Amino acid sequence: MRGPVAREYDYLAVGHLTLDDIGRERLRLGGAVAYGSVLAAGLGLSAGVVSVVGEDFPRDRLDWLRRHGVELSGVAVRRGPSTRFRIVPGPGRVVSSLSSRARPLQVADVAPFRGKITHLGPVAGEVSREVALQCASSCEVLVVDLQGFLRKFDRAGRVSLSPEGLNSLEGIQGVVHANESEARGTTGLTDPLLAARALSRRFGLAAVTLGERGAVVSGPDGTVVARPPAVDAEDDVGAGDVFCAALGAALINDGRVDEAARFAVAAAAASTKFAGPRPIPLDLIRRLERDVRITYLSR
């Protein structure tokens, strides 16, 4: 007998939805899967999320995602807490500590779903090698945000980076993303160009985001540096997550790395004009895209 048919999406995000405590702000919906899925749905893609949240997760946050076109049949509500972070307010906000963590994802959670683009967006080690392999075997483009594989937490929840976390991705090919500090911590290379090339040799295609300076995208055919236009930024939290989702969407649509980098950098820049996960108007991305500067470098 044939097994059940997997539910298929254009874009599938896998990882924990989070609650982010940012200074005096009300708890904000967060996590790479929130930012990425809302972007994808806003671009007209069918978008789904596979995640685990606790009983404390506000239902209005889930309702908000549904209203913005994100399908949540893959979100399991389980006993215990949701994943929650404290984030230091200010420019270039960073995670200061992990307050609580939902249970890790299991193969049984992801097996019923398939994405043409699957975005692995763990934030706190919730995606195992087995889950990553399952996702890699059932998509056309695998996009992996390395942050949740690299992070480790001490007893107080303080965050550090451990390159050993990437061992769970050994042998998996796809599109990987790291920010500048993560790329440096992973490769030991301070030059983001060299770090992107090193990650590319290991995983296939690698992107290192540089904040307002854009991104480096490196693959077998060479390296592209994409510089965005200046924008009046309100909040840069989640810009890297938006970059990942936009890069995957552009690659599956066109396949050209330079044009994908151009679109992803423009989308990330546009996202900084909004606070929290938000649909980003395509016309805004296209306007910014025209002013993205692309530099081609050989291997």
Image (cartoon, helix red, strand yellow):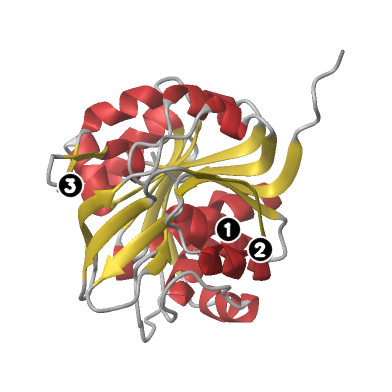
Mark 2 = which residue? 41
Q: Nearer the viewer, residue 198 or 186?
A: 186
Residue 130 vs 125, above or below: the answer is above
Gap in angstroms between the C-alphas marked 2 and 1: 6 Å
In the displayed structure, does residue 285 sit left or right of residue 139?
left
Residue at 63% from the left image edge and 75% from the top image edge: 282
Q: Position of residue 9 (x, y in %)?
A: 72, 47
Query: At label 1, which amino acid type do we have?
Result: Ser
Furthest toward the bottom, the residue is: 232
Residue at 32% from the left image edge and 29% from the top image edge: 166
On the image, which quarter does residue 236 sit in?
A: bottom left
On the image, which quarter does residue 153 sit in?
A: top left
On the image, which quarter does residue 259 sit in?
A: bottom right
Residue at 48% from the left image edge and 69% from the top image edge: 277
Q: Is residue 130 something that shows in the picture?
A: yes
Mark 1 = which residue? 37
Gap in angstroms between the C-alphas marked 1 and 3: 27 Å
